[in-house]
Image (cartoon, rainbow, N blue to C red):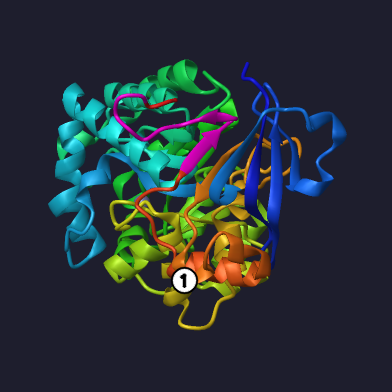
């Protein structure tokens, strides 16, 4: 239980793909369970909340960002030039992930990873660990310590990679069952995700077992999909009976309303129709797609078919955990003018919808968890006082096109204030 409080200052919160609430003089009241009691104009704060202790916050209060696809073990792998996805995996990523057999490496990287998320203003993340059960335990221990909202799982892979990273199906399922028992819902903030790396690194037996395990425990599923032509060609040769990549995931039980497919860059109409029919969501990783030259995400195609889309950094192919930079990459990668409300929505409320967390987080709204950041005001938005003369569009535009920060000013998850400094992770 926490002492209830009220934050005051400027606040904004996406309310749809084309809409954002903006209150230059806001109040956000939080109860002892860390739940938002009120968010809106300060002049309308209900009378019974007016006596709560108040804190004025600089910058702009905003819902904590959601990063729907990010690799913990790749924190230190950013910016490694590998020519193609498959070369990059073999030259940099598999060697880096192999080092997680060492507990000290697993601990050090996990600690720094979650601190970096706190600093970047990411309150919720859907995370891939490595294929090591012990390193995944350590990652969950550090996730719990961080105070962040984390959906995570051990990477499932049994072929096409160096031997130490491949775990045979039976052993992988036993280890994964144990991890689920220990960590899924161990706290209100932790969830377990079934995480097959991608089809080229998994036998069909492993994919089927993964789908069955997710269904048995009603878990999220995350994997990679249609990222590069080279990867897709490899899927066609490994699974010649499947009509296409999506069909192969469908027949192995991996598509559904709790599945989040990373990338979906080279997806055509038959595949997007299958994603739509199964209610499968997509994590769009524009910064990663630009770095690896993977191609342009067919945004309109996914929108036309009602696919839920979440933005994601995909670090380490993504070069930054800063979701404002990822939003800007999204706008640039589309090659046309994109309204700034859309990327802000896809990194908050839209991502929460894609992850089925919209009742818990994603916006500053009554009844949701107090997952709140304060973003430093971009220079173009003027001084704090100037905010009163700004529109929601102007603020959104300044955040997306000129905002880029190593660190937000303050960060709360479930009403608890977090700190990215090593000494006290939670303050
Ligand atoms: Zn990825």
Name the outermost residue toward the right: 47
Q: Residue at x 17, y 24 (%)?
A: 104
- Kindly identify which residue carries mark 1: 401
Instruction: Give the image location of residue 411, x and y in percent.
Output: 49, 39
Write down the region rendered in magenta. 410-424
Residue 48 appears left or right of 158 = right
Name the outermost residue toward the front: 385
Q: Quadrant of residue 78?
A: bottom left
210 or 356, nearer to the observer: 356
Q: Residue at x 48, y 71 (%)?
A: 380
Instruction: Give the image location of residue 120, x and y in percent.
Output: 40, 47
Magenta-span inclusion, residue 64? no
Q: Main secondary structure of the magenta part?
A: loop
249 or 383, nearer to the observer: 383
405 or 296, nearer to the observer: 405
Q: Does mark 1's beta carbon lie closer than 8 Å to ligand 1?
A: no
Residue 173 in sight here: no
């Amino acid at each position: 239980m926490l002492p209830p409080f009220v934050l005051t200052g400027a606040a904004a919160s996406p309310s749809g793909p084309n809409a954002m609430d903006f209150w230059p003089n806001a109040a956000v009241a939080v109860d002892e369970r860390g739940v938002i009691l009120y968010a809106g104009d300060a002049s309308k704060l209900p009378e019974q909340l007016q006596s709560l202790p108040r804190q004025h916050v600089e910058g702009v209060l905003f819902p904590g960002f959601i990063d729907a696809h990010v690799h913990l073990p790749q924190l230190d792998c950013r910016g490694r030039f590998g020519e193609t996805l498959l070369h990059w995996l073999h030259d940099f990523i598999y060697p880096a992930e192999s080092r997680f057999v060492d507990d000290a490496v697993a601990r050090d990287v996990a600690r720094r990873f979650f601190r970096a998320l706190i600093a970047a203003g990411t309150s919720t993340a859907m995370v891939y660990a490595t294929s090591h059960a012990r390193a995944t335990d350590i990652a969950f221990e550090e996730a719990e310590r961080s105070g962040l909202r984390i959906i995570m799982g051990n990477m499932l892979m049994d072929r096409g990679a160096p031997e130490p990273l491949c775990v045979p199906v039976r052993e992988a399922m036993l280890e994964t069952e144990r991890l689920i028992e220990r960590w899924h819902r161990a706290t209100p903030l932790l969830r377990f995700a079934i995480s097959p790396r991608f089809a080229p690194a998994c036998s069909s037996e492993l994919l089927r077992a993964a789908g069955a395990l997710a269904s048995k425990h009603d878990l999220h599923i995350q994997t990679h999909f249609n990222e590069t032509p080279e990867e897709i060609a490899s899927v066609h040769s490994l699974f010649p009976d499947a009509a296409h990549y999506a069909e192969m995931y469908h027949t192995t039980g991996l598509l559904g309303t709790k599945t989040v497919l990373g990338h979906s860059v080279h997806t055509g109409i038959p595949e997007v129709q299958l994603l739509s029919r199964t209610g499968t969501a997509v994590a769009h990783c524009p910064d990663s797609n630009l770095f690896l030259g993977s191609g342009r995400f067919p945004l309109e195609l996914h929108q036309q078919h009602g696919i839920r889309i979440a933005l994601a950094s995909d670090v380490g192919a993504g070069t930054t955990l800063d979701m404002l930079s990822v939003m800007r990459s999204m706008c640039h990668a589309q090659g046309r003018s994109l309204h700034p409300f859309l990327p802000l929505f896809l990194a908050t409320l839209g991502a929460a919808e894609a992850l089925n967390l919209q009742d818990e987080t994603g916006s500053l709204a009554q009844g949701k968890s107090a997952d709140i950041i304060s973003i430093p005001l971009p220079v173009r938005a003027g001084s704090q006082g100037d905010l009163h003369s700004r529109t929601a569009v102007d603020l959104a535009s300044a955040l997306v096109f000129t905002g880029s920060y190593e660190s937000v000013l303050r960060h709360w998850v479930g009403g608890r204030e977090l700190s990215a400094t090593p000494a006290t992770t939670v303050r």
